[in-house]
Image (cartoon, rainbow, N blue to C red):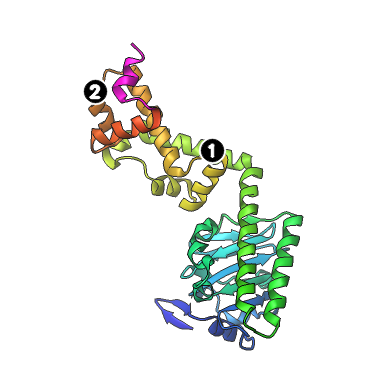
Amino acid sequence: MQQQSNINQIKSISQLVRVLGFPAPLHPLIALVDYNNVSIELFPKGQKVSLDFYKISFKPTFTGHIKYGQGYYDFEEGGLAFLKPKQIVFPPEDLESYEGIALYFHPDFIRNYPLGKTINQYGFFSYDVSEALFLSAKEKEIIANLFATIANELDNNIDSFSQDVLVSQVELLLNYSNRFYNRQFLTRKAVNHDIITSLDNLLDRYFEEENTLKNGLPSVKYVSTELQLSQRYLSDMLSTLTGLNTQQYIQNAIIEKAKEKLSTTNLSVSEIAYELGFEHSQSFSKLFKAKTNLSPLEFRQSFN
């Protein structure tokens, strides 16, 4: 492992497998690791690791947590974790954390396939670690069968079809994960609606405390940070529950605040635009017209 700034960088699948004490993989760009067979002594406590490839961890019965970045991945229910290349991993400190299976594959493995271009569309690779995919018993069975199919293919002798088959199986795994994440957004409505309520309160405070005068319009990065969620998770969750991504949700809140000011104050359109955080009133008027099919003045006149 190459060490830079106290971070151990693992650049290849072969290097990883060697570090874990396993024989060289049959395919140098993809490997499946059973962590029940990995010794915890292989990783010094607190050592940070950066992988140059994708990782999908499946822990069907695991109880515990693993630290990634600033947060901990809670696996009390078991489930799936996704890491994209260059993310920092803190190996677990307790023996019980070494359970489950991990699929590793290098970007070069999928580069010449459609998946190489579409993998960034799977938002969960950009989720924070606290935003795990928790699986029902039936979903765990489906995922376990997919991992078993991949393991079986990796155990076969490599031929001219091996990579095509493996890439299609990885893509199937990702598509099922997409479906299950959508289910999670819907079945955890109570928790997610609490997040939406917190977002509404956050935006209300932002306008009431006139943060717009100091910081401009509320950004996706700002609200995600305040809610302690990744930008991609928040946007995907909102899209599932409201049909709007985070930027669109913020814009709707801005328009509602603008309607309030247009209908209850004598402020000019330029003054309202300034109070809401727009640098140019034309930008405000353009957004308002796009959202309401009325100009700000036409909306105000409708109340007279």
**In the picture, residue 65 is in which quadrant?**
bottom right
Q: Amino acid at mark 2?
A: Ser
Quarter the C terminus occupies: top left
Callout 1 secondary element: helix
Most extreme residue toward the bottom, as rendered? Answer: 23
* Most foreground residue, 160 or 157: 160
The residue beneath circle 2 is 268
Q: Is residue 281 above or below residue 60?
A: above
* Most foreground residue, 273 or 150: 150
Kindly indicate whether the residue at mark 2 contacts the one at mark 1 (C-beta within 8 angstroms): no
Q: Which residues are magenta?
A: 293-304
Residue drawn at x 61%, y 52% as measured from the top left: 181
Expressed as whole percent of the image width and height from the top left, the position of residue 176 reads: 65, 58
Expressed as whole percent of the image width and height from the top left, the position of residue 270 reads: 23, 28
Can residue 150 be seen at all in this image of the molecule? Answer: yes
Measure the alpha-carbon separation of dots 1 and 2.
32 Å
Callout 2 secondary element: loop
**Can residue 298 be found in the magenta stretch?**
yes
Q: Is residue 66 above or below residue 272?
A: below
Q: Crowding at label 2, few (<14), some or many (≥20) Cα neighbours within 10 Å? A: few
Q: Is residue 210 above or below residue 70?
A: above
The residue beneath circle 1 is 242
Can residue 36 be seen at all in this image of the molecule? Answer: no
Residue drawn at x 46%, y 51% as measured from the top left: 231
Residue drawn at x 35%, y 15% as measured from the top left: 302
